[in-house]
Amino acid sequence: MEHIPILKMGQFLLVTIQVDMHDRLAVTLQNDLTERILKEEAKGVLIDISALEVVDSFIGRTLANIAATSRLMDAATVVTGMRPAVAITMVELGLQLQGVMTAMDVERGMEMLQRITGPDKEEPADGYRYEATDNNQQ
Amino acid sequence: MATVTKQLITISNDQDILLVRTAVRQVAIELGFNLVDQTKLVTAASELTRNIVLYAVEGTVKLEQVENQGHTGLRITFEDRGPGIADIELALKDGYTTSGGLGLGLGGSKRLVNDFDIESKVGKGTRVTITRWK
């Protein structure tokens, strides 16, 4: 069976989608990633889609599902490199990718993951950015 | 209105969605559509071909070059002999689905093209025709 390779980089998993994904391949990727997060105890997943020329509702839903599943397993997901034409089309199609964080490229995506999963800069769910130094100010 | 058939693709499984995406991209480039319009056409075609696979299993996708008063368009016709759609207005609503998907296929692809036409008879099948003009 066809698989998309998943690379491990420290505490993160890196996926670069290089082929036009058919539906089953997208589902396989989702399952593979879930298993690897558990096995590697990954804190974050980065999915680079800069080679993807199309993100239709199925691929979009798969990306959102990956982010939701990862979150339940205490890992963050960042999608990087979305092409402008893909972004324009997704908005008109009505795809919102709820709960999926995005970054311009892999480098910024990695920085984002490090920031989110860093030991002293955790961002609470309510959006308030917690600053460790604030604790000492009375 | 002059019409030239570019491709006729038979649909029988989800791998054929990829064939349609590749074919639509190819013809859209050939007709000189810009990148955003190519992407919209390919995405709409992907959604509507998936509908054939999901609901009817088998069908056809026809790609045609159309000319109207000096304007070039790409017309794609999706035809199946599946169960048909009882309430087209409801099926076009965002979020309505009977397959467990996102329910963006019909309504979403309608927003991605200039002309959208749907004919369906319960028990007979469905034909969706979309056109994007350059």
Image (cartoon, coloured by chain):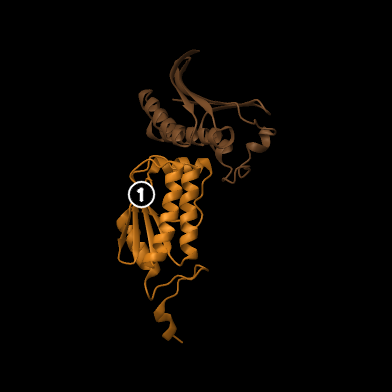
Taking the view exactly as shown, the residue that stands out farthest to the top is: B2
Residue A95 is situated, as x and y percent measured from the top left of the image, at 51, 46
The letter of the brown chain is B
Which is more toward the observer, A130 or A101?
Answer: A101
Mark 1: give few (<14), some (14-19) or many (20+) Cα within 10 Å.
some
Residue ID at (60%, 26%): B81
Tag 1, which secondary structure? loop
- Position of residue A128 relative to residue A67, above or below, is below
The letter of the orange chain is A
Taking the view exactly as shown, the residue that stands out farthest to the front is: A1
Residue B105 is situated, as x and y percent measured from the top left of the image, at 55, 38
Residue B108 is situated, as x and y percent measured from the top left of the image, at 55, 38
Number of marks = 1
Residue ID at (30%, 57%): A107
- Subunit under mark 1: A
Q: Quadrant of residue B118?
A: top right
User: Which residue is labeled 1 in the image?
Assistant: A4
Residue B14 is situated, as x and y percent measured from the top left of the image, at 48, 37
Q: Can you say which quadrant of the picture contains the C terminus of chain B?
A: top left
> The disc labelled 1 sits on which kind of residue?
Ile
Which is more toward the observer, B15 or B76?
Answer: B15
- Position of residue B118 relative to residue A33, above or below, is above
